[in-house]
Image (tube, rainbow, N blue to C red):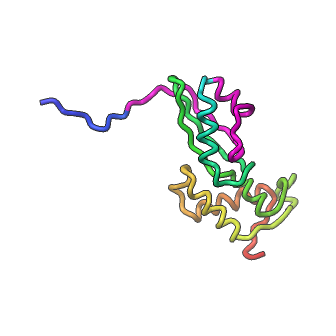
Amino acid sequence: MATVLKDVVVRRPVAATLRLTVPAGGARPGPPVAPVLGQYRLNLMAFCKDFNARTQKYKPDTPMAVTLTAYKDNTFEFIVKSPPVSWFLKKAAGLESGSGRPGHVSVSTISLRHVYEIAKVKQADPTCKHLSIEAICKTIIGTANSMGLQVVKDL
């Protein structure tokens, strides 16, 4: 008696895994997206339309991290992550950039409430789903310290 396999997953050969940072709603068929996707002969317009549709809830020019998997049959899949923690911290502190000498020169302060709000946003990311909110907060505090930001209980 032969057994029937159900839900067989067919693996397609992967050509490359690409990481891009694209502004929300700003994927255009030009640099920086076109050279990277064109190198693997991927459908540029399909990526731009899909990316812009997925990021329409964010403010324009918000930097979005994209992990794109390109397959050898010229198809692709991609995951859009939330903006980087450093971007959130700079927005919360009202800064253009961090300290040139973190640990020596403090450029601003943020409250634990800011850290918690950023952690809630980052917890929705596929790479952070398995982490507790406390662990995410600790990494955000570490990033803030490395940028020259002091984390205080209340402002």
Q: 37 or 144: nearer the eye?
A: 37
Q: 75 or 50: nearer the eye?
A: 50
The structure residue drawn at horizontal position 72% and vertical position 56%, both measured from the top left corner, is: 143
Q: Residue furthest bottom?
A: 154
Q: 67 or 76: nearer the eye?
A: 76
On the image, the x and y values in percent for residue 102 come to 83, 56
Q: Residue furthest left?
A: 1
**Does 5 lie within the magenta span?**
no
| Relative to 69, residue 108 above or below | below
Quarter holding residue 68: top right
Quadrant containing the C terminus is bottom right
On the image, the x and y values in percent for residue 117 come to 65, 66
On the image, the x and y values in percent for residue 49 come to 61, 39
Number of numbered callouts drawn: 0
On the image, the x and y values in percent for residue 116 come to 65, 67
User: What segment carries the magenta color?
Assistant: 10-39
The structure residue drawn at horizontal position 80% and vertical position 63%, both measured from the top left corner, is: 93
Quarter holding residue 78: top right
Quadrant containing the N terminus is top left
The structure residue drawn at horizontal position 72% and vertical position 75%, both measured from the top left corner, is: 153
| Relative to 150, residue 63 above or below | above
The structure residue drawn at horizontal position 87% and vertical position 52%, both measured from the top left corner, is: 100
**Does 34 lie within the magenta span?**
yes
Q: 105 or 136: nearer the eye?
A: 136
| Relative to 145, residue 32 above or below | above
